Image (cartoon, rainbow, N blue to C red):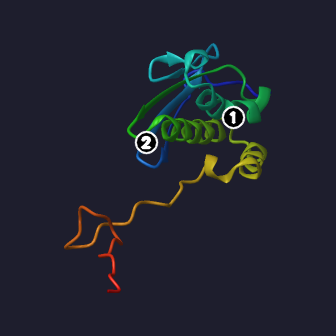
């Protein structure tokens, strides 16, 4: 394992639906903080597992790092996916390891790339009802 630079800091972002996560990764004791809460106390349990996936895939190759994530917008699982993406990108940038990037892409490509799906803009004259809503046809 190579020598870790104590002053090195990596900042990354992750997005999912309306959620935006900003992650800061630096050398430390192994603390993972999500919005001021330690990862062990994050609820629900499935969201916690999603956020842990990049660390599980990286294994011991990353060493002891501190990861602070701030997430805003969206719902619980959108925030979990955004945090997961920000952490995965940060770990790849931190290690500079192409094998880790390949392993993450093989596991789940959305961990390092954005999901391009967005809601369709509403059309004029029926902006409250939805983008494609039409008047129901009456046959008689």
In the rendered image, which residue does mark 2 sit on? 19
How far is the residue under mark 1 from the one under mark 2? 18 Å
Q: Secondary structure at mark 1?
A: helix
Query: Element at badge 2?
Result: strand
Of residues 84 and 91, which is closer to you in this image?
84
Residue 53: which disc? Answer: 1
Horizontal side of residue 133 vs 4, given as left or right: left
The answer to whether residue 134 is left or right of residue 86 is: left
Residue 27 in which image quadrant: top right
Q: Answer few, some or many: residues within 10 Å of disc 1's Cα (few below 14, many 20 plus, some between 14 and 19).
A: some
Query: Where residue 120 sits in the image (x, y, percent)?
Result: 38, 66
Instruction: Tell me where residue 88 appears, x and y as whole percent.
Output: 63, 39
Determine the residue positioned at 48% across, 46% down: 15
The residue positioned 63% from the left and 13% from the top of the image is 29
Q: Nearer the viewer, residue 25 or 72?
A: 72
Q: Residue at x 19, y 73 (%)?
A: 125
Residue 67, position as x, y percentages in the image: 56, 25
Residue drawn where x is 43% and y is 42% of the image: 19
Number of callouts:
2
Kindly give the residue lying farthest to the bottom in the view shown: 140
Name the outermost residue toward the front: 140
């Amino acid at each position: 394992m190579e020598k870790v630079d104590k002053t090195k800091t990596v900042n990354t972002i992750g997005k999912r639906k309306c959620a935006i996560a900003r992650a800061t990764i630096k050398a430390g004791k192994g603390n993972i903080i999500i919005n001021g809460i330690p990862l062990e106390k994050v609820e629900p349990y499935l969201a916690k597992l999603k956020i842990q996936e990049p660390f599980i895939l990286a294994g011991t190759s990353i060493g002891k790092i501190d990861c602070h994530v701030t997430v805003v917008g969206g719902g619980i699982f959108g925030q979990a996916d955004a945090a997961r993406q920000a952490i995965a990108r940060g770990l790849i940038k931190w290690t500079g390891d192409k094998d880790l990037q390949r392993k993450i892409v093989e596991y789940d490509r959305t961990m390092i790339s954005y999901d391009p799906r967005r809601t369709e803009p509403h059309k004029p004259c029926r902006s409250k009802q939805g983008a494609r809503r039409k008047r129901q046809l009456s046959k008689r």
